[in-house]
Image (cartoon, grey):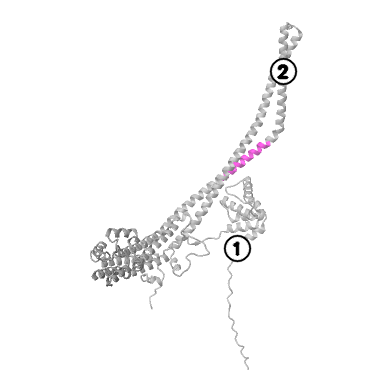
Amino acid sequence: MPLATAGLPFYRKKQSLESLVSERPQNLQSVYTIARENIAAVLEHVAMLEHAYYGPGGSLETEVRRWMPIINQMIRPAKFSDLISHSQLDAIAERVQDPTDKLKIDQDIMTQVYDCVHKAMDAIRQGLSGDIALLEKVREFMHKYCQSFSPAEGECYMETATNYEKQKAELERAISVNLQNVPLMVDKFEKEALKIHQFDFVMRDVGEKAGCAQAAVLLMFPAACHHVRNACKGLEMWLEADYNYANFLQLDITELSEKRAALAKLVHQHVLTAGEHEHRIKNIQREMATCSTELKRLGPKKKALMQEERELREENHDVLVDLDIKEYRRQEMKMLGQDDTDKFYNLTREIDTLRTRRPAIDRKLSELQKKQNIVTDKQTRRQQLERELEAARAELRGARKAARKAEVEVEKVDACLERLREIHRLKVAPDTLKKIFHGMPASPRHAPVHAGKKVKRDKLGVMCHVVASSIEGDWVHLYHALPFHPPRGQHIVTDDVDDIRTRFMRHTLEEQAKQSLAKWRRLHTRACVDDLRVALQTIRRLDVLERVEVALTPRRPAVAVKMHRTVHFPRLPGRTS
């Protein structure tokens, strides 16, 4: 009996770049390994080509010292300053072969120059064409499997993903440009013109220092090797960035989760601050109402006090006038010597009586002034309360604005956090490469993803949507019936209703109901489906509750009835006895 093999590990053969055409990579690490091996092979081959091109101990300087004198012996008699194209070389050769032309150049020199040119062109076309094709294939497979799963533009919280996408695009573009420049140099020299200023600044400086500025053909092969090495370096940088991408994403997720917690705490603080301002506004309004009631009650009394004050002041004025007249008369009688008469005695007694009445009048005026000051203080206090109410309302608007701003920021952070988790899951999931290989979408199109799991159905959100679309004008009674934690007084709840009506006055009743339920969910830290269900029962909207129950009832998928094939058997003839 053969041995059971179900528990034996399965080892796949080592993959290569050619095998990736017909089979998916084992994992992302195998893509890195294959790319690095091919890049190392290209760099090794380029080093061997340079050794074969320059010879043992050779370099660009030795090539320039060897070939520049020969090239000068050809171009100077032909009155050229530079050797810039193959057609120029052919034209010089034709002139040498023309017996009518006075140009005399040694045929051996022409042959050596042709050998130099063909050596450089063959080394590039035959020696580096395979390396270029190999690097292009590596770039294609890295483009296919080393993805960022992010657009190049996005929110500031997704900076790692967007920056990697930009870096990847820039590196890929630079790699393509470097690989395209290699055959482009040969084509330019063969079909158009190649001058040293057409090289990049690195090779231009190298050529000027080596002394081959007049013969760019001598710089073609080292420039081609330089471009191939640049392409390899770009691929290595791309591999390094993709290797660290998942780790950086995880760091961003951790940091963003901490920021989300801090923002949620800030939202809670702003909500509490807004609640304190609302409570303060209610107290001020209550005190203002008390002041208004007292002022209304003291209105007639104030008028009576003012009338009494006028009368007392008139009486006081009359007393002062009478006192002055009588004192003047008494003084006059003294001067006439009539101070011993009964008339003088009666006048003195009247003066004493008037002087006695003045303090009583002053006391009454003082008491009236105190009573009027009480009313004035009430009016001053009401004006002060109006100013405090305006300041408290401004602070409340600021707190609500800050809370809404923080809530928007939390929503933005939640969206970015969800997207980053999805990108991280796609980057580390083992089945992502399989989906890419078979041309399938990496993420589900219809089901949102959170850390590799499907999002649970938001029952409260579904219930709020159904209620908002069905409750109509009863949303006010519903809002008053809903519970709040921390508790909110009825005056504050009434203010909430007034605020929603004012801000969404031009909107439909459904939008007002939607905003009221959103505000309830935001302020009630323990909001749940049961709270809303009890509130609907309290306001006797059982029809809306029935619609909610229908919406929350999970629908069973329709199962197709399996068709059974009916077989009809022929009727057997009856048995005869």
Query: Which numbered tag is attached to residue 116?
Result: none
Secondary element at tag 1: loop
* Relative image position of residue 569 (x, y in whole percent): 60, 86
Residue 466, image x, y percentages? 62, 59
Point 61% across, 58% down: residue:
465
Q: CA distance from mark 1 to mark 2?
A: 97 Å
| Residue located farthest toward the bottom when viewing the structure as drawn | 577
Q: Name the residue tied to disc 1.
A: 553
Quadrant the N terminus occupies: bottom left
Task: Give the amino acid type for the residue marked by disc 2 in the picture.
Answer: Val
Q: Main secondary structure of the magenta part?
A: helix
Q: Report whether 61 appears left or right of 161.
A: left
Give the camera-side residue of 425 and 118: 118
Indicate the quadrant containing the C terminus: top left, top right, bottom left or bottom right: bottom right
Q: Secondary structure at mark 2?
A: helix
Q: Is residue 78 above or below residue 358?
A: below
Identify the magenta region. Answer: 274-293
Residue 219 in the image, given as x and y percentages of width and height: 30, 63
Q: Amino acid at mark 1?
A: Thr
Q: Who is closer to the viewer here, 226 or 388?
A: 226
Tell me if residue 541 can be seen.
Answer: yes
79 relative position to 441: left or right: left
Was residue 430 drawn as part of the magenta stretch in this picture?
Answer: no
- Residue at the extreme right of the image, as rendered: 342
Residue 27 visible, this angle:
no
Please state the horizontal and vertical placement of residue 250, each as a whole percent of the image: 43, 57
The residue labelled by disc 2 is: 321
Comparing 169 with 367, the one in front is 169
Q: Disc 1 or 2, which lies upstream in sequence? A: 2
